[in-house]
Every structure is written in C-alpha cells, then in structure tokens.
Image: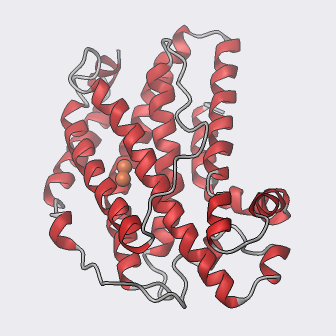
C-alpha cells in the first residue's frame, strides 16, 4: 500500500509537506494572469528552433525561412495540444485514486495537482484555440489501456512522470528564449514553475511504488514493465512528429517528411536530449 510506505518514509513526508505549502504560497489565478494579444506575429519563431522536429536535418535545408517559421507555429500548437490530451489522461487517473484506500497520504497533494492541471489544460487549450484555431487530435495509440494488474498504479505514475518531464524540457527552454513572443514565454514559464513541484513529487512516488512492486514481482514481470516504459518513451517522443502539422505548414508529402525526420541522425540526438534526465532517473531506480 502506497500510503503505508510513505508514512514510514520521513524524507518523503517532508517533501510532501514542503510541496503542498509551496502550491498554496505560489497559487495564482490563471484566468487573470495572462494577457492574450489579438494575434501573434507570423514571421517569427513560435518554438525555439532547436526544439522543432526539423532542426539539424537535411529537410530543414530545403525549407525557406518563412516555411520554418510556419512549421514552428504549427509545431507549437501541436505541443500545447499534446499537453491538453496528456493532462486529460492524467487527471482521469489521479482523480480515480484520490481518497481511495492506499492513497490517503498523498491525497492532500493530489488536490493541488488536480487543481493546477485543470488550469494548465485551460491555458494550453486557450492558446491553441486563439492562435491556431484548433486543438490537434490526440495521436493514435495514446490512450492505450494500461494493463489492469497490481502494477497499474506504478505504470500510471511513471507515464505521468515521463510526460511531465518531456514537457518540462520544452517549457524550461522556451521560458528563457528571447526569440519568442512574451505570451509564449509566459505560459512556458508558469507551467515550468508548477511542474517542478509535480516532477519532484512524481519521482518520489514512482520510487516508492516501484519498491513495492519489486517485492512481489518476478524478473519476467519486471522486464515487461521496463519494455512497457521504453515503448511509452518512444511513443511520447514520436508524437512530436505530427503529419497534420507538416500538412498545415504546406509540406506536400507530410508522411514522407515524418518518416525522413524520424529516421534522420538528428532524431537520435534530439530524443537523447529530451529524455536525458528522465532516462537517468529510470535507470537509477532500475525501472529500465
Ligand atoms: Fe501541467
Ligand atoms: Fe503537472
């Protein structure tokens, strides 16, 4: 039981306390916080160029500056759309667990988590609808059911952590990127602030959940968990390469471009940098 393990862990209890207090102290009203200009200039980066899927590839050399800007605009809408879908999924899972047996101790923090995520989903959706006039559809395979078993909660929170760390890689960089409009920097900055708490919590929770699972699982089962998480890492990363984005940016053969980009040497380096911290954590705990 998760709560029992947390209750014996003074360090984790201290962290929970500190994070909860910080959530209360840093609380803001998202509906008043942001300024939403009528429009954002088209002829500029909407996403740091180093974080776009064509960066460092041969394909980028075939595109004009105007096309690269357009691509960054659609990729940015795709990125916030992925956030909307990811948050919906994690809200469902955390809401399912709050105040249920085993989750008594983290439930207080879950209240802040759920409240903050609802607000994140609002400002990401707002950005997409205002400046992109749409939310991109959820990538196929995203809502693949997590197998129902005694490891279900571990997989749920490991997925949430992977998703939040991926997003944070982008947020923390774009918050500081002076090439981006202030509206874009602000949503990335605010999200990064809240996510630092969620990630700190997630790492502790996943560690405890895994300790519990390890005691009752065979080597074969542990290998299945590792394989599942590896698949999820790849899937999450590849969802950044959305053919509909390439189509919207005026690329003629979007599926061909997607394949070319996924197979390009730049992809390997990009994926490694996005998951550098995450992989280190998952390896250190023995999850992968
Ligand atoms: Fe969030
Ligand atoms: Fe979060």
Would you say 273 lies left or right of 12 here? right
Height in image: 12 above or below 96?
A: below
Task: Measuring from the top left, give residue 89's x and y in whole percent.
Answer: 41, 38
Name above or below for residue 130 compared with residue 242. Answer: below
Spot occupied by residue 164 in the image (x, y as percentages of width and height): 46, 50
Residue 241 visible? The answer is no
Q: Is residue 124 something one can see in this rendering?
A: yes
Rendered view: 147 above or below 39: above
224 horizontally vs 121: left or right: right
Occupied quadrant, residue 71: bottom right
Residue 216, x across and y down, in percent = 53, 8
Residue name at image x 64 percent, y 29 percent: 228
Would residue 251 be found to the left or right of residue 103 on screen?
right
Q: Quadrant of residue 185?
A: bottom left
Q: Quadrant of the C terminus?
A: top right
Name the residue located 15 percent from the left edge and 63 percent from the top edge.
29
Residue at 73% from the left image edge and 88% from the top image edge: 64
């Amino acid at each position: 039981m998760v709560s029992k393990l947390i209750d014996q862990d003074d360090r984790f209890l201290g962290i929970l306390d500190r994070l909860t207090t910080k959530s209360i102290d840093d609380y803001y009203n998202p509906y008043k916080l942001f300024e939403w200009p009528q429009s954002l200039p088209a002829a500029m980066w909407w996403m740091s160029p180093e974080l776009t899927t064509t960066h460092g590839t041969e394909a980028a050399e075939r595109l004009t500056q105007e096309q690269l800007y357009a691509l960054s605009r659609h990729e940015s809408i795709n990125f916030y759309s992925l956030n909307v879908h990811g948050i919906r999924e994690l809200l469902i899972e955390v809401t399912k667990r709050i105040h249920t047996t085993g989750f008594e101790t983290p439930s207080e923090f879950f209240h802040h988590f759920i409240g903050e995520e609802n607000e994140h989903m609002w400002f990401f959706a707002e950005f997409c609808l205002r400046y992109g006039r749409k939310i991109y559809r959820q990538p196929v395979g995203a809502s693949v059911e997590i197998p129902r078993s005694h490891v279900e909660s571990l997989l749920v929170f490991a997925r949430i952590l992977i998703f939040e760390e991926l997003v944070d890689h982008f947020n923390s960089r774009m918050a500081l990127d002076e090439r981006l409009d202030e509206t874009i920097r602000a949503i990335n900055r605010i999200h990064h602030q809240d996510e630092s708490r969620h990630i700190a919590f997630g790492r502790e929770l996943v560690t405890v959940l895994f300790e519990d699972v390890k005691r009752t699982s065979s080597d074969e089962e542990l290998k299945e968990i590792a394989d599942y998480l590896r698949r999820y890492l790849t899937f999450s990363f590849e969802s950044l390469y959305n053919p509909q984005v390439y189509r919207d940016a005026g690329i003629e053969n979007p599926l061909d471009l997607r394949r070319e980009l996924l197979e390009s040497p730049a992809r390997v380096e990009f994926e490694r940098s996005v998951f550098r911290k995450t992989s280190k954590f998952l390896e250190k705990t023995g999850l992968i």
